[in-house]
Amino acid sequence: MNRLMVAAYAKDPITLGGVIGSLEGRPDLCVTKYGRHIRPDVLVVCVNAVTGDTVAMLRGIAGREPTKIVVVTNHLRDVDVLPLVECGVVGVVPVAAATPERLGRSVLAAADGRGEMPPTLLGQLLGQVASLQRDVLRPKGLIPSGMADREVDVLRLLAEGLDSGQIGRKLGISERGVKNVLEVLLRRLGLRNRPHAVAAALRAGLF
């Protein structure tokens, strides 16, 4: 059996010991203290309250070694839900509900790419994403994937087998304009070529 590498973090040793003790008896997990020079499959972070310092710490972890994170906490403000998700948090467990069974289930779900959040937090997250799209992205002609509407249109027609000239005639822009759109898109998103861009758009479910 391949055991998942799980790292645990808490400021005080009693809480840290409790988290490790809740998980280390499972045969499918290998649990250690965070910072032991291993890259965990899942990081469990236990804090009394999610603060700006917590978000900054998780953002730093995400920058150094991106991993899936489960946060166990007593207090989480609405405004911190989206920043946590951006840092790699895929699960949030209230301290009162953090039984060994629940915590283990959340770790396995995180490793499998499935997030677990209380329904109220999920509703807050969806509301913040909708607000971001409505108030920030759409006015600039962008969608959550980071692509503008015109870029999506170009990629959709490219996927249909049209060349730059044909795409330009469909969209009412020049062939050079189509090529410019593609060049800017490839550079901004770090894509290698046109097929790579089409594949990325398909994975994102844009068409």
Image (tube, rainbow, N blue to C red):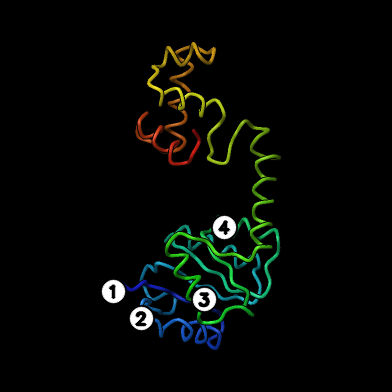
The residue located at (66%, 60%) in the rendering is: 80
Q: Earlier in the sequence, mark 3 or mark 1?
A: 1
**Three-letter code for the amino acid on which mark 4 is drawn:** Val
Please identify, in this view, whether the residue under mark 4 or under mark 1 is nearer the observer: 1
The Cα–Cα distance between marks 3 and 2, rounded to whole angstroms, is 14 Å
Q: Which type of secondary structure does the marked residue at label 2 adopt? A: loop
**Three-letter code for the amino acid on which mark 2 is drawn:** Pro
Would you name the residue on which mark 2 appears? 27
Would you name the residue on which mark 4 appears? 85
Q: Are marks 4 and 1 in contact (CB under 8 Å)?
A: no
The residue located at (45%, 81%) in the rendering is: 23
Q: Are marks 1 and 2 in contact (CB under 8 Å)?
A: yes
Label of residue 103 in the image: 3
Q: Are marks 4 and 3 in contact (CB under 8 Å)?
A: no
Residue 93 location (% of width, % of height): 59, 72
The residue located at (56%, 70%) in the rendering is: 71
Q: Earlier in the sequence, mark 2 or mark 4?
A: 2
Residue 182 location (% of width, % of height): 44, 25
Q: Earlier in the sequence, mark 4 or mark 1?
A: 1
Taking depth in this image into account, of 13 and 195 the one nearest to the observer is: 195
Would you name the residue on which mark 1 appears? 1
The Cα–Cα distance between marks 1 and 2, rounded to whole angstroms, is 9 Å
Q: Which type of secondary structure does the marked residue at label 4 adopt? A: helix
Q: Residues within 10 Å of mark 3 (few under 14, many from 20)?
A: many
Q: Residues within 10 Å of mark 4 (few under 14, many from 20)?
A: some
The Cα–Cα distance between marks 2 and 4, rounded to whole angstroms, is 29 Å
Q: Earlier in the sequence, mark 4 or mark 3?
A: 4
**Three-letter code for the amino acid on which mark 1 is drawn:** Met
